[in-house]
Image (cartoon, coloured by chain):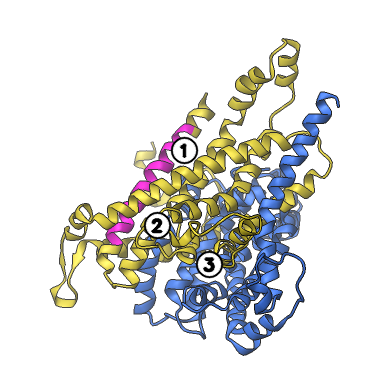
Chain colours: A blue, B yellow
Amino acid sequence: MSKPRWSRLMVYLALVVAVVTALVPVYWMLTISLKSEVDQFASPPRWFSFSPTLTHYADAFLSRSFGQYLATSATVAVLSTLAAVTLGTFAAYALARFRWPMRLDRRLSLWILSTRMFPPIVSAVPLFLMMRDLRLLNTTAALVIVYTAFNLPFVVWMMRGFFQELPREMEEAAMIDGDSRLGALFRIILPLVVPGLAATAVFCLIMSWNEFLLALVLTQTDAAMTLPVGIAGRVTQYEIKWGVMSAAGVVAMVPILTFAMAVQRYLVRGLSLGAVKG
Amino acid sequence: MSAQLSPTLRKPRTRRPPRELSLAFVMAAPTIAVLLALSVYPLIYAIKVAFQSGTGADAHWTLQHFTRLFSDSFFLAALGHTLLFATVALTFEFLLGLGLALLVDRPLRGRGLFRALLLVPMMLPPVVVGVVWRLMLNPDFGAINGTLRSVGLTTEALTWTASPRLAMLSVIAVDVWQWTPFVFLVLLAGLQAIPQEPYEAARMDGSSAWQTFRFITLPLLRPAMLIALLLRTMDLLRVFDQIFILTEGGPGFATETVSLYIYRAAFRFFDFGYAAAMSFVLLVITNLISAGYIRLLQRQEAA
């Protein structure tokens, strides 16, 4: 075999190893969620040969409270995303397109970014005490408020980048034609950034859906907790129902993976807060 | 002349129409207000909690929470675990991610598919990552030990997250599993942004593969590397979710990180003052490290 073909083969081999390593653990959880207890504890492990059952899914989402956690997670994710995207897009436009005095546009943008850099545990203690004082512990409202603030810096940075990529002449032309500034924004600019806006919203959904620490601190009752907190509460108890856990894990994972594939093109940009255009 | 005009006649000097600027302010105000209320105010609140002792009428200012930090061997151990966890995980994630990115940075059939499949671990909810790896690492029926046994190995010593010696290794391995794809993606994006011309010039000059890598790829990839390292470091220093699910900081104290210790102080022992004081130490450490990276990045841009 010639040398380039060899090296090509090695590249593919390395990639296959990487992909298998990435996916096998997830696949194993999927099989556990579909296995009867006998198959779960079988030795050697049964990777393919087992009779699939949906009892764990029914158990988790019909007999236990996971259906409720799921509904809370979805509500919190959707409401906080809507709020963050609406507020953040206007702020991003204001910071991307207007000349503020004393370079405030740049300074405000950097300050907004810096609020995102706190480790969440730093905010967890004061937010818990604040929500306790406001009697908002164990409410969906508390999580919606906190996640909106959590996602806002992200929306501002992403949307600011998308706005800056459009030439200024676009609004100026519309405004010469008689549009107001806001008219130009809604009629000309927003339609052009719709793909970026959609990707940003999907990222907010993912981050709200995945968030764990603040939800753990702010919600402890069955009626208020999100899916990650519900799963964690069961995992760390002594008697673990592996099938139920895995079923809940699969359900928590599927919407996220669907969304992630939808925004693949923007993934690097989103995960690096706009720092890498990818 | 102007000095003799009455102040009422003088027009304010503006370089831009004031209505434009007030529109900008109105658009940005809600965001600024939300962040003031939910990021800045909590920080001030935390300062108050960290520097006060007692409640109600007994409340007084004190440094006791901060002095206690330095004699708290548990806190110092948690800090050591966090730094160990961050350093080892960062090293592996970076080297593996760089290796993969260099491999994939060439025309390959099915590259898009590889990329998409490699994304899966890092998009998973951290709690689900915890569940996945509890299922893999369980000493009795986990897939790893089960597979080792089926090829004839004994696995009694391999208790993974239940073993004081292997627990840290396990949580590091899980983080490397989850986040190497991120480093890979950022570095791949960086590699693909490098123009072709320097490579062509190097080929004409007869550079070896190593020389091309050392003098062209590495310097041009530096900004992407620094961003990947910065974002990973920030994330590693605050690690909480996966460790909480996998080991809860145990066995004993073997995998307790600063975030977990703060959580325990605040929400198990309701020692909010001490928890807030430790939060500040964590905040200062992460800020110093990120300032270092950002300096390197800026020096890069200036050069």
Q: Is A238 placed left or right of A249 in the picture?
A: left
Q: Secondary structure at mark 3?
A: helix
The 10 Å Cα crowd at callout 1, few under 14, some 14 to 19, many 20 or more, is some
Q: Which residues are magenta?
A: B276-296
Give percent across and percent down for residue B265: 30, 67
Q: Is residue B118 magenta?
A: no
Q: Chain of mark 1?
A: B
Q: Is residue B14 visible?
A: no
Which amino acid type corresponds to the residue marked 2 in the rendered image? Pro
What residue would you read off at disc 3? A148
Which amino acid type corresponds to the residue marked 3 in the rendered image? Thr
What residue would you read off at disc 2? B164
Q: Chain of mark 3?
A: A
The reply to the same-chain question for discs 3 and 2 is no
- Is there CB contact under 8 Å for labels 3 and 2? no
Q: Is residue B280 magenta?
A: yes
Residue at position x 36%, y 66% in the image: B263
Q: How many marks?
A: 3
